């Protein structure tokens, strides 16, 4: 079969290899969507409220290749919420000694 259909055989082998690779790394692939929102929320919170940088600078600082589908900066409570790849994460400034921390559960989200 390989001699008669070499291109089909190679494509089938590539698809099979990618399937096995995805299966072996399934836990990492499942965690990836949460990383985008968590990184953006935590780093923006630290940039904005710990380092006291302007908002425009911090937005550019956390920009990534994977875009966010939602972003909200609650200046009154010093809480940042970021949504990316279907996962929403929040970070809040705790104080000058503690800095910013990711929140375990996203709070009630404002409409973006």
Image: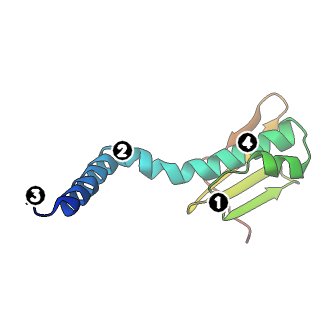
Mark 4 against mark 3, which lies toward the viewer?
Answer: 3
Farthest-out residue, bottom:
111
* Residue located beneath label 3 in the image: 3
Q: CA distance from mark 4 to mark 3?
A: 54 Å
* Residue located beneath label 2 in the image: 25
x and y, in percent, of residue 69 in the image: 66, 65
Mark 1 against mark 3, which lies toward the viewer?
Answer: 3
Q: Which mark is residue 43?
A: 4
Label 2 with label 4: CB-CB less than 8 Å: no
Q: CA distance from mark 1 to mark 3?
A: 50 Å
Element assignment for label 1: strand
Does label 2 or label 1 sit earlier along the sequence? 2
Q: Which mark is residue 83?
A: 1
Does label 2 or label 4 sit earlier along the sequence? 2
x and y, in percent, of residue 46 in the image: 78, 39
Farthest-out residue, left:
1
Does label 3 or label 2 sit earlier along the sequence? 3
Q: Is residue 96 left or right of residue 11?
A: right
Mark 2 against mark 4, which lies toward the viewer?
Answer: 2
């Amino acid at each position: 079969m390989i001699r008669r259909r070499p291109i089909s055989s190679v494509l089938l082998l590539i698809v099979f290899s990618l399937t096995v690779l995805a299966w072996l790394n399934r836990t990492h692939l499942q965690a990836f969507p949460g990383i985008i929102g968590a990184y953006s929320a935590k780093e923006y919170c630290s940039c904005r409220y710990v380092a006291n940088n302007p908002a425009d600078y911090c937005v550019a600082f956390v920009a990534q290749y994977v875009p966010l589908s939602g972003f909200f900066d609650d200046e009154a409570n010093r809480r940042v919420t970021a949504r990316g790849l279907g996962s929403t994460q929040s970070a809040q400034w705790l104080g000058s000694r503690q800095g910013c921390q990711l929140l375990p559960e996203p709070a009630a989200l404002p409409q973006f």
